[in-house]
Amino acid sequence: MSKFEFGEWVLLTSQKGKKWLVRVEEAPYSSHLGGINLGDIAGREEGDWLVTSKGAKLMLFRPALQDYIFNMKRRTQIIYPKDLSAMIFSGDIYPGCVILETGIGSGALALALLRAMCGRGRLISVEKRAEFALEARENISRFFGGMPENHEIIVADIEGFHLSCQVDRVFVDLPEPWRAVESLCGMLRMGGLLVSLSPNVGQVQLTQRQLKVNGFGDIVHFELLRRDWKVDQLRARPFDRMVAHTGFITVAKRVSAERGEPLENGPDYGEDSEIEKAPEELI
């Protein structure tokens, strides 16, 4: 493992799990646990630690993407990592695919997509508000040390936006995603996937309606709840707080039906489903 160098991001982590994201530079840094000189991090290895002026130990790690996302500058609500991971997997992202993203916000989804693409393919992010586009650009550039060559940010309204080529995947994070479905339909190739995130079920219903009449099938909707556990020598129990509902994820496929012809919904997991059910004792 390479040693830390000046200018690199470092995640300072206390023994109780408190975290601070800093840069390696010749500058002092202080917290309630005491002060350190950030320049002393240079030359140390990941997993090493520094002792503060108050005698506390701070471990040194390279930040994971979710560490950066939670600490980056933002004026919009970010997509939580539990949803980001599901969107990336459900959208079947792979190196080399061409992706259209609409509603870049602070750049959290774009960062996750770019990481999954491994520098290949192309990500086109369309954002209506110039100030959001600028902030996202700064966050992305700060994380990668410069703007990735395969990423383009365009300030435009997606409802009147057109591409000269078709894309493999579409990701939507908009207040009114149903209004963009018709435009997005013409830019997504047959068999391509559309993934949308909405916080309210009313948004999901309106989006579902537009998807069905604009050439999309195999439509599914779901949400994810995360509950952490506290485990030590004396007990094992869930924490009192949990990251519950943050949004509904919609996944749909572009199919060859005529526009205006309603398509059947996605898989039915009801009582007559052919999917094998788990034994009652496991439910």
Image (cartoon, rainbow, N blue to C red):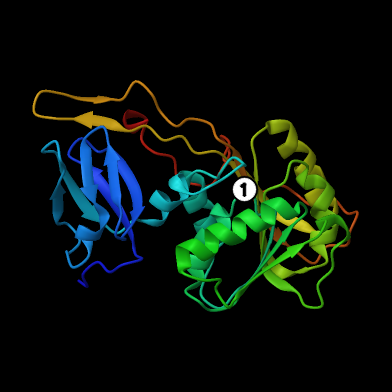
Residue 212 visible in the shown view: no
Vertical side of 238 occupied by 197: above or below:
below
For disc 1, the marked residue is 267
Q: Position of residue 196 (x, y in %)?
A: 66, 49
Query: Residue most toward the top?
Result: 240
Vertical side of 178 occupied by 54: above or below:
above
Q: Residue at x 78, y 53 (%)?
A: 128
Residue 205's image quarter?
top right
Q: Few, some or many C-alpha atoms within 10 Å of disc 1 (few <14, some 14-19, many ≥20)?
A: few
Between 34 and 101, the residue placed more toward the observer is: 34
Residue 50 visible in the shown view: yes
- Amino acid marked by disc 1: Pro
Q: Position of residue 111 (x, y in %)?
A: 52, 60
Residue 107's image quarter?
bottom right
Q: Position of residue 191 (x, y in %)?
A: 69, 68
Residue 136's image quarter?
bottom right
Q: On the rendered structure, is 169 left or right of 113?
A: right
Between 239 and 49, the residue placed more toward the observer is: 49
